[in-house]
Image: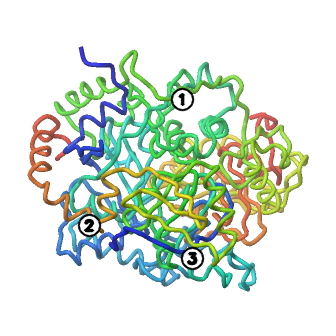
Amino acid sequence: MAAPRTLFDKIWDAHVVDRQEDGTCLLYIDRHLVHEVTSPQAFEGLRLAGRKVRRPDATLAVPDHNVPTSNRAQGIADEESRIQVDTLTKNCADFDVPFIPMNDVRQGIVHIIGPEQGLTQPGMTIVCGDSHTSTHGAFGALAFGIGTSEVEHVLATQTLYQRPAKNMRVSVDGPLPVGITSKDLILAIIGRLGTAGGTGHVIEYAGEAIRSLSMEGRMTVCNMSIEAGARAGLIAPDDTTFEYLKGRVFSPKGAAWEQAVELWRSLPSDEGAHYDKEVHLSASEIEPLVTWGTSPEDVLPITGSIPGPEAGRDANKAKAIERSLEYMGLKAGQKLTDVAIDKVFIGSCTNGRIEDLREVAQVVEGRRVAESVYAMIVPGSGLVKEQAEAEGLDRIFTEAGFDWREPGCSMCLAMNADKLEPGERCASTSNRNFEGRQGPGGRTHLMSPAMAAAAAIYGHLADVRELAC
Amino acid sequence: MEKFDKLTAVAAPLPMVNVDTDMIIPARFLKTIKRTGLSEGLFYALRHNQDGSRKDFVLDRPAYKDAKILIAGDNFGCGSSREHAPWALLDAGIRCVIAPSFADIFHNNCFKNGILPVVLPEEQVNKLMEAAERGANATMTVDLESQTIEGPDGEVIPFEVDAWKKHCLLNGLDDVGQTLQKAPAIDSFEAKQQASQPWLYA
């Protein structure tokens, strides 16, 4: 009998086109998502070498990083941003690549629209020139971020040279406590593994707390695998997955649907499959979390206090803590709930889906954003925006004092006009709290949509459990 | 891609852990459709004060103006997949980065651009870091063929590298051209996959 295999092993084995002596494999890529920032040089490479896109039908492009989130009818004011978006438009026309333009209702963050359109399916290999491609692993697809040279390679050959990753399983045992979200879960995992803990691995998330998550919640978890150093995260496909996919634009239909589901049911890891590393967390111990520093591993329960350099596990980390404290303008021993904020950003490929917006609405309905705070909500796609408006969420947001905007990556990485000013402090539902990530000198605290909503109401970091819903 | 065989150069010390690609090159410098000229944004926040004036960053010191090697702490290149990070390093003349560990995507991206990332145990990185503090008086030789680094005092340190990546880097090979020679294998993979999972080709 064949040796038991993990979900990762099965997807890998099914996509090997060729194997080198040192174990490097030429891997077939089923879907390639493209955006404007990491693709221009790849198309330029194709053009210079006189090459074509091998499978335009397996490729989808959309502008998301540079797009404005207000007054979109006026186009893009920033010249460099406009050139980048125009270049993508032209490249897609020249190479026959399917393209969703900025003013299309389906436009949005590439990792939101892939699943929304049903392009993301179990068992697939999916790549994109973007590290948060790990999001798609929520469907049991092997999905990872690549650089621009690799984007060119996939466009030309529909393959990539890769070394097999190691298997890690992170199990979150027990049911998720009330008021704890998928964002708290993944922040807890990153806090445990550290920002390099998953390097060289693909993380398979398992356990009761993971299984009980909706597809939106699973995407939030897999999205931040890269913040734990893993290029890809995976969750075994199940009925929740199939229910989400059924009837979407690119989902298989009719007899093909039945055939696909049958195949997908064979994907979950076999009993007794080998994992190079196993980690267990107990869901009942997870509290609402926020980051205090400039690395996503700098997580603390909202009830905690800012650590000092002595909390570092070695001299290097102690030095890094000292640097973070200075950058963040915080003092060791300060209570997290005493940290006042200037801005709130709700959105991104981590937390820009409909469920995230419902979570925010539940907290802010009938309340007001604090006087001292500017709070913005950027839906992940035009379809998310439409859905939210159909449910009346936009009214709840605007009545509470939130700015309700157009979809895009926005202030997650501040490539468009949405950014923090030097020294400004933000409660953000995005994925990275690196120095300068949300604008030069800006200070980022990562948290769940519910916690960001609570921070908006209080004007400082706050425990959402204190706002009885 | 420029090939990498043997490099003798000054090494610049950057004793920081978790140097992320936003730090290597902030997002606002990614609004380009070219691969060149990115050194302007390299380590921008580490090199400049808020008012735009220069800080005393290691690569701006006279002793390191010819540095082609960078020595850094754990988890170098974490975060965003932006290949602009190795492009910016290359644009500033850096051809080799030595660290105790690298983030996977950055590590891959280096090999596509003629940059050799070398993983060494922390203890050895610390020794080279110390040697690098001596500036222009301390050159190192990185030899990819023999997979060794010779420090300024003559000590020789071996390192590991994947055979395939080494082959490509030594010969400056363009991946795409090579892979296209495997077109028959890709064709037959597609034919088989299309027969068993036709919905992937709708």
Image-based side of A467 in relation to A7, left or right: right
- Camera-near label (2 vs 1) is 2
Neighbourhood count class around disc 1 (C-alpha, 10 Å): few under 14, some 14–19, many 20 upward: some
Q: Position of residue A38 (x, y in %)?
A: 41, 67
> In the rendered image, which quarter contains the N terminus of chain B?
bottom left
Neighbourhood count class around disc 2 (C-alpha, 10 Å): few under 14, some 14–19, many 20 upward: some
Residue occupied by mark 1: A170
Please report, as a chain letter, where disc 2 is located: B
Please report, as a chain letter, where disc 1 is located: A
Q: Quadrant of residue A100?
A: bottom left
Residue flagged by tag 2: what amino acid is it?
Asp
Q: Is residue A293 above or below residue B136?
A: above
Residue occupied by mark 3: B67
Whether residue A72 is visible? no
Depth check: give the residue in front, A443 or A150: A150
Residue flagged by tag 3: what amino acid is it?
Ala
Residue occupied by mark 2: B174
| Spatial CA span between label 3 and label 2 | 26 Å
Q: Position of residue A231 (x, y in %)?
A: 46, 46
Q: Position of residue B122 (x, y in %)?
A: 62, 49
| Spatial CA span between label 2 and label 1 | 38 Å
**Mark 3: which secondary structure?**
loop
**Mark 2: which secondary structure?**
loop
Depth check: give the residue in front, A38 or B93: B93
Residue at left 72%, top 47%?
A291
**Mark 1: which secondary structure?**
strand
Residue at left 62%, top 35%?
A185
